């Protein structure tokens, strides 16, 4: 069987994309059962890829992938895939496997994902120092995992008893929030500068423009989920203020990315695994919008969330089918 691409960490983006369809659907009325089915499918997909990675990857393989300036960026995908499945276990899987088992899965995958995500957020940027490579959307992949940890950690903090442990967890999540936020603030201007000076570049890299939505949407989600675990003064106000301001910029970037993608598609947009960049980042904008709506009920947030979720499901179906077709050849 011919593979569409070597087995790399970018394959875990399919777990991220499938998982965000499930977790975003958890907040949508009437979609809990379908969302739980998608989560179960995602858990099986994660298990399959982890087993395949254990069989295929050696230390020399990992070193070669880290030496590749493009593939190295996608080492951020495995930790986010782990935590996406863990979050789904808490939000949806507990209906089927029970809360104690869901918490065990959630804590295990959060711990593994956070540790691996912190490693990628340090090692991959260090690898890029002095490389002379031009920034592209994929540069955000290794620094987004700590933001996913912050959002997932907020859900876990709900199940800790009041006191020092819960407070420490929330403070740790805010620290993880800061790691990813400030790294994003360093990288996004470089991406914009490249667009201005060099244009969109190769068609296969255009979908990575959507990755910018990932840290934006995930930070909105994290800020408002953390507001639901009040251990510090002003958490709710921070979540609403930061979330609304960032939400506005995220919508602006969504339009820019969509127009750039449409222009590229008219000239030809060949399928590549980078198409998964359409899915998870858009999903974080859905979860962020829902998180804002949970603290500030508004027809605007609710309506936008429904429209974005419909687009998310359509994108997921399209990319999943194209991925399956390419691997079946």
Image (cartoon, grey):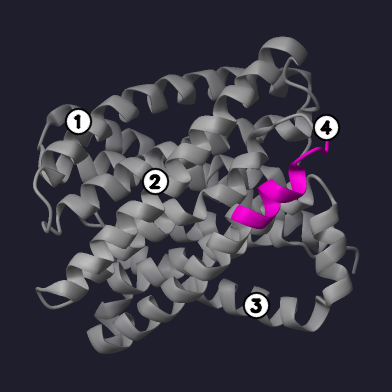
In space, the residues marked 1 and 2 are separated at their CA atoms by: 16 Å
Tell which circle, 4 or 1, labels the residue nearer the N-terminal end.
4
Q: In terms of secondary structure, where does tag 4 sit?
A: loop
Q: Quadrant of the N terminus?
A: bottom right
Mark 3 surroundings within 10 Å by alpha-carbon count, few (fewer than 14), some (14 through 19), many (20 or more): some
Q: Which residues are magenta?
A: 122-131
Query: Magenta stretch containing residue 316, yes or no?
Result: no
Q: Residue at x 31, y 52 (%)?
A: 174
- SS type, badge 3: helix
Pointer 4: what residue? 132
Look at mark 2 in the image and give the residue it sits on.
Answer: 178
On the picture, is 156 further left or further right than 193? left
Q: Percent x, y for residue 210?
A: 56, 34
Upstream in sequence: badge 4 or badge 2: 4
- Closer-to-camera residue (57/97): 57
For the residues marked 1 and 3, what is the alpha-carbon distance in whole angstroms?
39 Å
The residue wearing badge 1 is 241
In the rendered view, tell whether residue 200 sits above or below residue 152: above
| Image quarter hosting the C terminus | bottom right
Q: Earlier in the sequence, mark 3 or mark 2?
A: 3
In this rendering, position of residue 96 left or right of residue 205: left
Image-quadrant location for residue 169 = bottom left
- Label the magenta part by its dominant secondary structure: helix
Label 1 vs 3, first from the N-terminus: 3
- The first of marks 1 and 2 along the sequence is 2
Tell me the distance, in whole angstroms, between the alpha carbons under discs 4 and 2.
Answer: 26 Å
Which one is in front in this view, the residue at disc 4 or the one at disc 1? 4
Are the two marked residues, 1 and 3, in contact with CB atoms closer than 8 angstroms?
Answer: no
Outermost residue to the top: 197
């Amino acid at each position: 069987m011919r593979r569409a691409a070597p087995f790399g960490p970018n394959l875990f983006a399919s777990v991220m994309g499938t998982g965000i369809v499930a977790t975003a659907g958890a907040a949508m009325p009437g979609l809990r059962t379908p969302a739980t089915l998608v989560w179960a499918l995602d858990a099986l997909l994660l298990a399959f890829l982890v087993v395949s990675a254990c069989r295929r990857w050696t230390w020399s393989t990992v070193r070669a992938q880290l030496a590749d300036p493009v593939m190295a960026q996608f080492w951020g995908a495995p930790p986010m895939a782990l935590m996406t499945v863990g979050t789904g276990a808490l939000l949806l899987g507990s209906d089927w496997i029970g809360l104690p088992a869901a918490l065990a899965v959630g804590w295990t995958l959060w711990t593994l994902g956070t540790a691996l995500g912190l490693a990628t957020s340090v090692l991959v940027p260090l690898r890029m120092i002095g490389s002379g490579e031009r920034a592209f959307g994929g540069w955000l992949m290794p620094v987004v995992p700590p933001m996913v940890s912050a959002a997932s950690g907020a859900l876990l903090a709900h199940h800790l008893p009041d006191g020092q442990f819960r407070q420490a967890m929330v403070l740790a999540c805010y620290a993880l929030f800061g790691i990813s936020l400030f790294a994003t603030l360093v990288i996004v201007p470089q991406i914009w500068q490249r667009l201005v000076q060099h244009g969109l570049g190769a068609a296969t890299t255009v979908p990575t423009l959507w990755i910018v939505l990932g840290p934006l949407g995930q930070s909105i989600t994290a800020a408002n989920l953390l507001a639901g675990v009040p251990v510090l003064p002003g958490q709710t106000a921070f979540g609403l203020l930061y979330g609304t301001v960032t939400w506005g910029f995220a919508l602006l970037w969504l339009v820019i990315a969509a127009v750039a993608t449409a222009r590229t598609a008219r000239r030809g947009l060949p399928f590549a695994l980078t198409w998964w960049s359409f899915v998870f980042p858009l999903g974080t904008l859905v979860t962020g919008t829902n998180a804002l709506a949970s603290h500030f009920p508004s027809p605007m947030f609710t309506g936008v969330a429904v429209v974005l979720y419909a687009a998310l499901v359509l994108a997921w179906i399209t990319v999943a089918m194209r991925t399956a077709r390419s691997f079946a050849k």
